[in-house]
Amino acid sequence: MLVRLIRAYLRPYTRSIAVIVVLQLVQTLATLYLPTLNADIIDDGVVKGDTGYILRVGGVMIAVTLAQIVCSIGAVYYGARTAMALGRDVRAAVFDRVQSFSAREVGHFGAPSLITRTTNDVQQVQMLCLMSFTLMVSAPIMCVGGVVMALNQDVPLSGLLLLIVPVLGVIVSLIVRRMRPLFRGVQERIDTVNRVLREQITGIRVIRAFVRDEHERKRFTGANTDLFDVSLKAGRLMALMFPAVMTVVNLSSVAVVWFGGHRIDSGDMQIGALTAFLSYLMQILMAVMMATFMFMMVPRAEVCAERIQEVLETETSVALPLKPVPPLRREGLLELRGVEFRYPGAEEPVLRDVSLVARPGQTTAVIGSTGSGKSTLLGLVPRLFDATDGSVHLDGVDVRDMDPVVMAETIGLVPQKPYLFSGTVASNLRYGKPDATDEELWRALEIAQARDFVERMDGGLEAPIAQGGGNVSGGQRQRLAIARALVRRPSVYLFDDSFSALDYATDARLRAALAEETENATVVIVAQRVSTIRGADRIVVLDEGRVVGTGTHAELMEHNQTYREIVLSQLTEQEAA
């Protein structure tokens, strides 16, 4: 999975990778050549007292060293650029894929996990590539070249390499094998810490209201301790690897000096050759150590790549049409035909056999008890998720066959939990219509009964809005979300319980202003409050996902027991009449 991901996203950078390989090859060859030059200086210069030879070969060593430095700097520069580009491209791909997800896929992964996969997981893969370009490319060249140059110095002494390298390989493979499942646990526990922290930050008011600070502190401590424990186990294995490798390295050096000393004593080897052989041994073992360091990173990067690939390979349940069908007219006629919606694995559908028509110039209201499927029904229209059976039509075209841009221009949705983005009042209102004028914004605010409090804010339209609208009240947030939908002037308005945080007087004024603004548009209102929808042209009553009644307020009060019970739970007989 890791190789497939890296190969796919490094393909555009093959030229840069080729430059990196060439530079690493040159600097490694230069590194390998230096001990041989040093041996020549000792054997042919120092031993014989030839100062001129020492100066000539010393000059060559300086030139080789400069070439090594230049190539090393170039390799690191290109390696860093390529690795950062890989991280950027993978993050963009994950972001684009998540943007295409419906509410179903987002719920499946969870927001904390998607954030971790887009940031921390991508960073691990990016870091592995960076280390590969700076270390791993040179490691095999250094190892093979070191063996060749060591053989060139003394063949019998090189027999020690047949024992040293396999021992190192076995030690590294045993440790790496145990590290992989631990790193998967680390990433999963990072998800948990993100989730708990996100819940606590978002729900800080509830925590304070119920004085649950200590409980939440213990919950975070538990998640944090789980991450600590798994990270500690992985850290212990990582800490074990370096002493094990260094033990082999040091024992190898002792063995080389021991046997090399006997060969020098017998006249089979010169001092310079032993010095060069020791240098090549160190280079070989350093190459193995670099590879060891890489192998320590590979298990975690592999787990992260699997998590990234899982997101990239998840197809959205809301697929874009291959050949979008343009609507024949732009009136705003909305039809649901035998719609059913069922969550994956659920025993019962949320909606079943729902049929209704919402016409332009009319207000259609949907009411029902909690959990009856009202918000789910509204979410099917803009394709937050698709119906599992039946179809939703807008101006005679199935919404699954419509161009998303055309649909976005046609529909204005105010969700049940309005969300404002960090920025200003103006930037939030222009979210659906970037070229809207200030006059259009003020008019939308006036209709939404939000002009008065926006004028009181420092900066007016340029007043800052915190992430999620945290610096405005719930009612103000709802009114700004309604104004944002009004700025677009769509032909279909969908209000998902969008007046619940308003007092009755503001609610009445807003609905009166809306009626005038949307007189030619299709308006669908989902509400819990009877006073909000009693004046609707048509009221649809939902009960356990089924339509159990349609009609006006008066008709339903007379003939529909479910609606009557809902109304009388909020109003008296006289008020309902």
Image (spheres, rainbow, N blue to C red):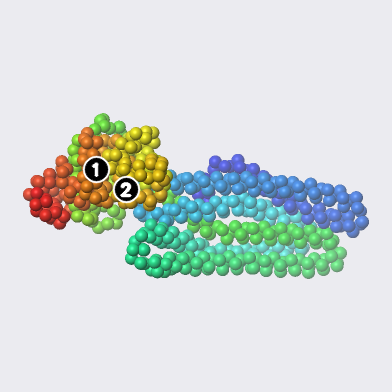
What residue is drawn where x is 54% and y is 46%? 86
The x, y position of residue 487, in whole percent, is: 32, 37
The x, y position of residue 145, in whole percent, is: 71, 53
**259 to the left or right of 412:** right
Per the image, the residue denoted by label 1 is 510
Per the image, the residue denoted by label 2 is 476
**Total label count?**
2
**453 to the left or right of 370:** right
Tell which of 109 and 32 is nearer to you: 109
What residue is drawn where x is 63% and y is 65%? 242
Could you tell me how far apart the alpha carbons at marks 2 and 1 are, in whole angstroms?
12 Å
- Which circle's residue, 2 or 1, is located before the other in the chain? 2
Inspect this view and state whether residue 295 appears. yes
Mark 2 and mark 1 residues within 8 Å of each other at the beta carbon: no
Q: Residue furthest right?
A: 49
The x, y position of residue 237, in whole percent, is: 57, 67
The x, y position of residue 301, in whole percent, is: 52, 56
Residue 421's disc is none
Whether 79 is drawn above or below 296: the answer is above
Tell which of 282 and 92 is nearer to you: 92
**242 to the left or right of 93:** right
**246 to the left or right of 419:** right
At label 2, the amino acid type is Gln
What residue is drawn where x is 47% and y is 68%? 225
Q: For the residue carrying disc 2, how many other residues have a C-alpha within 10 Å: few (<14), some (14-19), or many (20+)?
A: some
Q: Residue furthest front?
A: 456
Secondary structure of residue under mark 2: helix
Inspect this view and state whether residue 337 appears. no
Whether 262 is drawn above or below 391: the answer is below
At label 1, the amino acid type is Leu
